[in-house]
Image (spheres, helix red, strand yellow):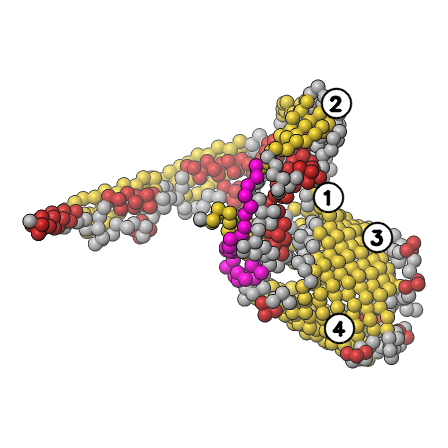
Amino acid sequence: MKKTVRAILVFIITVNLAFCELPAVTKVTINGLKNIKADVVTAVMSLRSKTEYSDTKAASDFKKIFNLGYFLDVEVAKETGAEGVEVQVTVKEKPILREVNFFGNKEVGRGELETEANLEKGESFDLTSLKNAAGKLLKKYKEKGYNLAAITYETKEDEKNNTINVTFNIKEGRHMYVSKIKFTGLKNLTQSVLKGKMDTAEAAFLVSGIFNEETLARDLQKLVAYYKSEGFYLANITTHKLTYDEVKEKIFIEINVEEGDQYKFSEVKYSGINDNIYKESELQNIFNLKKDDIFNYDIFLRDLDKLRFMYSEKGYIETEVSGEAYPDKAKKTVSAMIKIKESGVFYIDKIRVENNYKTKDNVILREIRIKEGDLFSSNKIKKSLESIYNLGFFEEVNPRLLPVAGKPERRELVLTVKERQTGQLQLGANFSSLDGLTGMLSVSENNFLGNGQRVAVSWEFGSSRQSYDLSFFEPWLFGSQISAGASLYNVLKAYYTDYKDKRIGGNLRFGLPLGDDSRIWLTYKYEQVNIYDVLPAASILIQSVSGTNDISSITAQWVQDTRDSIFFNTKSGYRLSASVEYAGGLILGTTNFTKYVLDASTYFSISGDLVLAVRASSGYTTGFGSSLNVPFYEKFFVGGTDTVRGYGERILSPLDNSGTPVGGNFMTLGNVEIRFPIYGPIFGTTFFDAGRAWEYVTDFDVMNIPTSAGFGLRIMVGGALMIRIDYGFGFSPKATQGGQIHFNMGNIF
């Protein structure tokens, strides 16, 4: 009986499978094509000759064909025959854009309009793209000050060839500018103060006065925020209106302000605090607002951010910190309630890197100061990102934390990077105030084979300078934190009046870490210095070292560097350096001296990208043994491009009888810069310099140190290379009359 039932079931299943067998596709036909090739359509289809047909596949192919973006309508049908299914695909193509014309444009060129519209001839046309193009053109006109411009469009279709022509009709109107900004309702703040907080500005000398609706909307928000920062917590912009003169050229903006009363801070209370993490007194210590202070809403928000950071620093990264301010109109005070919803602590499970197509994972991972299994630390993450940026290999480094399945207390740290070009082939010319015009050919790679190694070969040639240089640097020797580098060079300096200076040598350098931010560098240098073509009128100091001298030296240098960026856009941190160079004596060579140098620089963010940078440096050198006098070319020189701007090169150093700088045994200098962005990769700076070199330490006279002031431009190239142009005006008799312009590559500090 069981065998009979089993046989019946097998028979039924076999019959069902036979009836369910899918029909085969015998032919695929594409109808309605004029400009698009059939291969473009069939390439995305799963229904092809000799494949099985199903309605699911047909529906999927319909979506794929429509998503190509070439068609207004798509139909996928089937015709069933004895041998199988013939698939009929019928499409209606979008017209092809043949011409784009502009009429009425006088102030904006056709090329700029074409670029802005971004309608490609020969591509499929659709109405949505046309509407977007019109919107972009109108926005461009408004950006240029044509606020009442109007743009319409019309189309002309050739049905036979399925092409279309587009014409934009432009009414530009007059060029408009903001003539007057007026505030009403003011009692406490002035018109000029409020105007200074706006990006929208009245037209004036070097101020265009261009009006932009989005900019004005942001300005109104900024004005309210500024009032709140001054204690006017309930201040509000009640209305604003625009009016024009009769010819629609001048724009008048009137902004009505309801200032309200100025409020003071009364107290802050906390809820949800777990004393095991932070006590209320610890939270209160970082809260900047104190009783009876003018209530500054900006400071209040920053204090909330500090509280969030405190919790994330201990691994409580999902702790919620929110704050509410409660004004008391009768007392004119504001109290605050800070609510803390603490989360559990989190640990780093795994760390991985994305989008690093060239740089190897280990080059990035070794810069990360937090390790797998460590408690999450916001500060370590911040320092890690700074270290990765300072490699100079990446335009962007974006961290993400992802949950880990089955491990609620752990997170995966993912760093998504965007690499920049690190190899350079340069053939061109350089100009600096010291070297003059020099030709240059160099090949460099700062991320050799993706290993983070730096290799460079360069040749400079000019009437005043010739040099050859080959260098290699390994930041992680054999996978350890020890750095190593080597260089060979041949440099001729022929810009001195009384002599020429030629140096052939090389060095070996090793860096040993002392902590997260400090290192010891040990450098051995061997150099042959040839002073030749010495004029008979040259000083005894120069003539005494005429010929070839050997320098064999070891330098020990301690560096502590906490800067957030080693490039020009440094906003915080400091760099301290102390070095001692010992030449001759036990390590041979024909020249004996020791040289001591102290250097310190620090950076403060005044507001956003406005940065104050300060540097101080001092050095001392002395001879010993058989050469008590230090050769002049190893002494200190001050004045010019990289030291005190506004003066000739090296002119603030001891001079011989002919006025040639011969260097001093003691030097001190200082630089103060205020740095600010101008546009894109262009930065500006104003500076104050002071410094000088003396023959003896006892000659030091703080009251007679030459000073200068000036301004400059910094142009960043490729994110890491910088062109520097400075104009300095000196205040001592040795200064260049009328000031001096200085050119160079790289930053002064």
Asked whether the viewer can see residue 401, the reply is: yes
Picture quarter with the C terminus:
bottom right
- Disc 3 from disc 1: Cα separation: 23 Å
Magenta stretch holds residue 356: yes
- Whichever of callouts 1 and 4 sits on the residue coming sooner in the sequence is 4
Is label 4 or label 3 in front?
A: 4
Is label 1 or label 4 in front?
A: 4
Is label 2 or label 1 in front?
A: 1
Identify residue for label 1.
606
- Whichever of callouts 3 and 1 sits on the residue coming sooner in the sequence is 1
Residue 173, image x, y percentages: 58, 31
Report the front residue among 277 and 296: 277
Is label 2 or label 3 in front?
A: 2
- Whichever of callouts 2 and 1 sits on the residue coming sooner in the sequence is 2
> For the residue labelled by badge 3, is the local secondary structure a helix, a strand or a loop?
strand
- Disc 2 from disc 3: Cα separation: 43 Å
Identify residue for label 3.
708
> For the residue labelled by badge 4, is the local secondary structure a helix, a strand or a loop?
strand
Residue 594, image x, y percentages: 82, 71
Where 503 falls versus 174 (above or below)?
below
Q: Residue at x 91, y 60 (%)?
A: 700
Q: Residue 79: name its quadrant.
A: top left
Crowdedness near tag 1: few (<14), some (14–19) or many (≥20) residues, C-alpha within 10 Å: few
Is label 4 or label 2 in front?
A: 4
Q: Residue 286: name its quadrant.
A: top right
Identify residue for label 4.
554
Crowdedness near tag 2: few (<14), some (14–19) or many (≥20) residues, C-alpha within 10 Å: few
Identify residue for label 2.
187
Q: Residue at x 69, y 38 (%)?
A: 281
Q: Amino acid at mark 1?
A: Ile
Q: Amino acid at mark 4?
A: Ile
